[in-house]
Every structure is written in C-alpha cells, then in structure tokens.
Image (tube, helix red, strand yellow):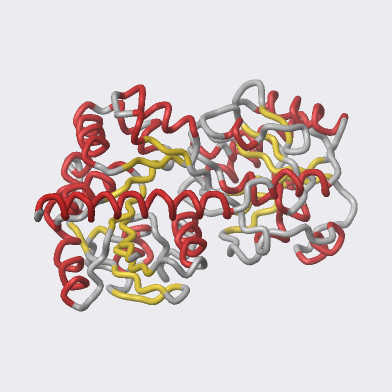
Amino acid sequence: MKILLFSTLHPSSARPIHGIFVETRLRELLKTGQVQARVVAPVPWFPFKGQRFGEYAQFAATPRVEQRNGVEVHHPRYLLLPKVGMNLAPFAMALGALPTMRRLQREGFDFDLIDAHYYYPDGVAAGLLARWLGKPFVVTARGTDLNLIPQYHFPRKLILKTAAQASASIGVCQALMDKLGELGADRSKLNTLRNGVDLERFVPEDRAKARQRLGLPAKGRYLLSVGHLVERKGHHIAIESLQYLPGVTLLIAGAGPEEAALKELARRLGVADRLRWGGVVPQTELKWWYSAADVLALCSSREGWANVLLEAMACGTPVIATDIWGTPEVVSTPAAGVLMARRDASALAEAWVQLHTQLPAREETRAHAQTFSWDATTQGQLQLFQRVVNARVYDASLRHA
C-alpha cells in the first residue's frame, strides 16, 4: 500500500521538532513493512532567510526536497496572504502542492491514499487534491483544528464539507471526534486512534545521574514544563506557582515568542533564581529532563493529545495537567498523576501537594505509559487504510463492470 502523507505539521531540517508527532506516527507505520510512503509538507513562500524574520526565515530555509528517516519529504511553497490568509490558505496550499503530487505520480509513486493531518487548512486542502487527483483521503484531527478554528463560520463550513467527502476521520483523542460529531459530521466515519509513546526512546534514567547531566544539584525538588513558549501552553502559570511552592525549582524546556515576557514575569515575582531555562531540547535528550524532574506540569488551555504527558510518564515521572480535551484520557489513574481543579497557579500548587501525599513509584508511572504503546494505533491505521483502499478498488470494479 502506497501512502502520501500531507501536512504542514511534518518536521523539516529547518524546523526539526515541529510536528514531530506526525513523523513519529508515520515512522511506526513504516516499521510494519506493509506501507510505502512519501511526504508532501507545504510551507508558506517567503524570500528572506535573515534571523530577524523569525519563523518566516525558517520557511525560506526549508529545502524543497529532503530525506528524513529514509523517507522522501517534499516542501512545495504556497502563498499565504496577511489578513485574508485564514480563508484562502486551503486553496493556496492545494494549488501549491498539486504539481509536486502529479510529479510523484509520473515518477512512479502512484499513491493509493492521502493521509492528511490537521483538519484546517491541511485537511481541506487534501480534500481538494483528492478530488483533482481521483484519490481517497483520510484526515486526522489533532487539536486546535477542531477545538478552536470551527468557531469561525467559513472554516467550519469547509471542515464539515471535507469531513463528508473524506473516507474517514481520525481523532488523536475521543474528545475531538465527539466535537466533530457535534458539529454535524457523520459519526459512522469517525475513528479514535490515540498517539502512542516511543517506549525505547523515553525510558527512566537514574534521577541523580540525570540531574548531574543537566548541571542541577542532586538534592532538590524540580517541576518541569515542556513546550513552545506561547500563552496557551501555560508556562506563566508554572512560573506563578513558585510563589506557593517554596524550595521548588522550575525547569522550562522550549523556545518561543513569549520567552522575554516569561523571564520578566519571573523577575517581577522574585522567583527568577528558581528557574532553569533549557531552550529547544532535541527529542533524544528529553528523557534526561523528564528523569531529572519530580513532576511534569502541563498548564495548557487547549490540547488535543499532549505527547509530553506520555513521554514524561514513560520516563517514570508523574504529571499535573489541566483538565481539558484528551488529557483526562491520559491522566486516568493515580499512577499517571493529577488533574488541576482550575487553570491557575494556586490550583497547580494544590495539585503538587496532593500528588506528593501519595507519590506513585516510578515503576508504576512507567507501567501506565506502557498501556499506550504505538502497536494498537499502528494496527488501527493499517486496518482503516486497507478498508479505504479496498472500498475504492471495489467501487472502481463496479463502474467498469
């Protein structure tokens, strides 16, 4: 079976950890030996690579074609216009990607199915491409594409049209499929396939050794916050919680536009000396951060399925998280951690105290993560994709009978 993965969320050499969960799911699928794949990951066109242009410079620095983990990845450009970009993005993206997809077919990779990730604009663009190329497609919803974007009328209309056209929709948590059903999608076409966790990459390391590796004192209490430094990830809540948690040091792994504001907040609250900033941490190094911490905090306002939760648990570190969307599906036992009563600093501090009254053993937390291996998700994908492809072949045979 030949799969074409279509998503702007796929990583590149210019943005190596961007959308790493999309690449991971494909990598697990390829391990079965039953699938061949190419990736088309469009990026907005931008002419300048100077660092002062921030994320746009990364778009310009993205290669047109590259190999990642043995997979050929194409990055066609599309025009993203300010102000009106949100409504036009699916159409511009589809038009920008069409020549690349046709060239892949001419060169011998005549794919059986388009595997699109993120409903808007990527999934809508995939729907246009599927119609133009006469291919079936499946869309995976991942978070803000369904828990935020449908509040806008025009995108919501296109999302529902795409859901009706798609052979199937996949949600990384049940809450997202419930939402798509509430919006009006055919529930018989909705499937939940949760992200798994790489249990070989994320393993418990000796805590003292991990702290030494990061240059941290061996004795101490450490709270960890991981993710892009933007408001919705809630790093500011973790910083504010230090006012209520004397003796606790906060580790922050991530980079983003809010970094300066977060550092100013810590200075203003008088807790800057209890913060350690890690910047962007490669996936291969994250296990040391998870293992060094006593607890991971995820204070997001929106998440579909937060991979950092399972990554931390796989390293034997329990979590404190906001009670949103798919998170209760992950933090579902005392061994996993605690859900916050509210999304604020005092609730985080209360959850810290609650968790430490009966802190689970690292082995128990790891065992909980092991129930979320990639095996079930990968088999679910294979079965779903095969059904879609078989149905397409059957329909074609009827038309030619």
Percent position (x, y) of residue 139? 33, 46
Percent position (x, y) of residue 186? 30, 29
Q: Residue furthest left?
A: 400
In front here: 370 or 241? 370
Residue at image x 23%, y 44%? 124
Q: Residue furthest right?
A: 219
The quarter of the picture where the N terminus appears is bottom left
Determine the image quadrant of residue 187: top left
In front here: 240 or 401? 401
Determine the image quadrant of residue 268: top right
Determine the image quadrant of residue 101: bottom left
Residue at image x 54%, y 28%? 324
Residue at image x 52%, y 62%? 28
Q: How many marks?
A: 0
Q: Eyeballing the image, is 195 above or below 30?
A: above
The quarter of the picture where the C terminus appears is bottom left
